[in-house]
Image (cartoon, helix red, strand yellow):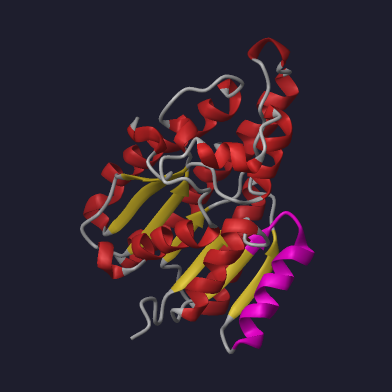
Amino acid sequence: MARLAGKVAVITGGGTGIGKKTALRFAQEGAKVVVTDINPDSANSTAEEIKNAGGAALAMAHDVSKEDEWQRIVSQTVEQYGKIDILFNNAGIYIIKPLAELTLEEWNRLMSINVTGVFLGMKHIMPVMAKQQAGSVINASSVAGLIGASGHVLYGASKGAVRIMTKDAAIEYAAQGVRVNSIHPGYIDTGMVAYASETTKHSKSELAQAVPTGRLGTVEDVSNMVLFLASDESSHVTGAEFVIDGGGTAR
């Protein structure tokens, strides 16, 4: 049986990486998927791949930092599919930079995407779910929201905010049947890790050697966790954080 049969999911940053893999996986499990991305070509590519495989998908250009664009996403999704069961707040950007070198512009830009984008998604989609008395929100945080690291004051602040926002929203909406959880990936083999490798001057193999399991995580590793949290299998799970880091934060 398809684990997401009959469900409608909105995935931000669905054009590449973790977002794309999760969108494809959701569709394979029976969900109708709304793929949003700042890059409309990327969103369209993911949606076309889903449709070519026999699934249902809708692609939309989307700047998650803008409230009117969230209102458009919600209205068009409900018009097209009648409801929203799942929100994966996945879109985000990554900056590694010493504290004293950060600019206010960099701070505001990253926060507008990583924090404000998650807030706006919850603000506009969770009330729709509450009316249905059911829904699952998965917010992408990071191990940087749990532990400190040099050069991560900005990124870590954003992911720490996502972590606690998730818990607050989970308590607020628990009685209305809406679940909210956060995921905390470590080094996952995506463009962000390529950027981290270049910035820190550590090769991917060196980064992998620092992981207790001896390898980088994959987009499949993350999408498997997101699928569980989106499905009814996690019906009694809310306000929790799920670490996908090969044991890195266990040290």
x%, y% of residue 52?
66, 87
Q: Residue at x 62, y 61 (%)?
A: 14
x%, y% of residue 64?
63, 48
Residue 233 quadrant? bottom left
Q: How many marks?
A: 0
Q: Residue at x 73, y 18 (%)?
A: 103
Q: Is residue 228 above or below residue 248?
A: below
Pick the residue in front: 43 or 134.
43
Position of 132 with respect to 25 (left or right) is left
Quarter that holds the N terminus: bottom left
Q: Residue at x 39, y 81 (%)?
A: 5
x%, y% of residue 96?
66, 27
Pick the residue in front: 30 or 190.
190
Position of 83 with respect to 60 (left or right) is left
Q: Residue at x 49, y 68 (%)?
A: 9
Q: Is residue 20 visible?
A: yes
Q: Is residue 40 magenta?
A: yes
Q: Is residue 41 magenta?
A: yes
x%, y% of residue 104?
71, 19
Q: Which residues are magenta?
A: 36-53
Residue 168 quadrant? top left
Farthest right residue? 41
Q: Is residue 12 visible?
A: no
